[in-house]
Amino acid sequence: MRSVIRVDGEIVEPANADVVETEPGVYSVLLDGRSFEARVAGAEIAIGGHRFSFEIEDPRAWKRSVGAAGAHGRAVISAPMPGKVVRILVEADEQVEAGQGMVVVEAMKMQNEMKAPRAGRVASIAVHEGDSVVAGAVLASIE
C-alpha cells in the first residue's frame, strides 16, 4: 500500500525527485536537473511563488473511526498494535455507552483501554484475558 498525496484536491503520483529538508519546513527539491525550493506551512506548500494545499493519506495510519460502522450495524473494536489482553471490562449482551472502556491491551509496557465507538449492545468478545493479539485483531464487537 502506498500513501495517497492530494494537491489542491487532486491525487498526484510522487515524482522521482531528490528531496532534502534544509531547515524546518524548507525543502530543496532536485527534479529532472532543475532545483526548486519548497516551503511547507500547515497544509500548504509554496513552490516558485505558487501556493498549493496538500494532504497525505497514509494507509498504515491507524484511524480511530475504522470499524465504527456509524450509528447502525456492527462496530468492531480492534487492537491498534500487538500486545496482551490484560482485562476485559464488559460481558456479552451488556449495554455500553459511547467511549466506555471494553478491553485493556498492554503493549510496550503501557496499558491501552479500547473504548466503544458508539452506544450499543456487546455482540461478542473475541479474546480472553492473557491472550496475545496482533495489530488489527478483533477484540470485541457491538451492535
Image (cartoon, rainbow, N blue to C red):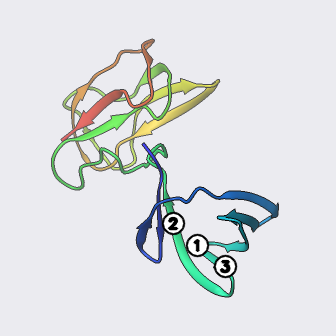
- In space, the residues marked 2 and 3 are separated at their CA atoms by 16 Å
What secondary structure is marked by label 3?
strand
- In space, the residues marked 1 and 2 are separated at their CA atoms by 6 Å
Q: In percent of the image, x 45 and y 12: which residue is there?
A: 130
Residue 67 placed where, x, y %? 30, 44
- In space, the residues marked 1 and 3 are separated at their CA atoms by 13 Å
Q: Are marks 1 and 2 in contact (CB under 8 Å)?
A: yes
Q: Which amino acid does label 2 sit on?
A: Glu
Q: Residue at label 1? A: 43
Label located before the other in sequence (2 or 3): 3
Q: Which residue lies furthest to the right in this view?
A: 23
Say which quarter of the image contains residue 77. Answer: top left
Of residue 37 and residue 53, the one placed in the foreground of this image is 37
Q: Which amino acid does label 1 sit on?
A: Ala
Q: In percent of the image, x 46 and y 47: which residue is there?
A: 2
Relative vertical location of residue 6 with respect to residue 91 in this rendering, above or below: below
What secondary structure is marked by label 2?
strand
* Quadrant of the frame with the C terminus: top left
Q: Are marks 1 and 3 in contact (CB under 8 Å)?
A: no
Residue 14 placed where, x, y %? 52, 59
Label located before the other in sequence (1 or 2): 1
Q: Residue at label 3? A: 47
Q: In percent of the image, x 41 and y 15: which residue is there?
A: 129
Labels in figure, total: 3
Callout in the foreground (2, 3): 3
Q: For residue 123, which numbered disc appears in the image?
A: none
Callout in the foreground (1, 3): 3
Q: What residue type is labelled 3?
A: Ile
Local packing at callout 1 (Cα closer than 10 Å; few below 14, some 14-19, many 20+) is: few
Local packing at callout 2 (Cα closer than 10 Å; few below 14, some 14-19, many 20+) is: some
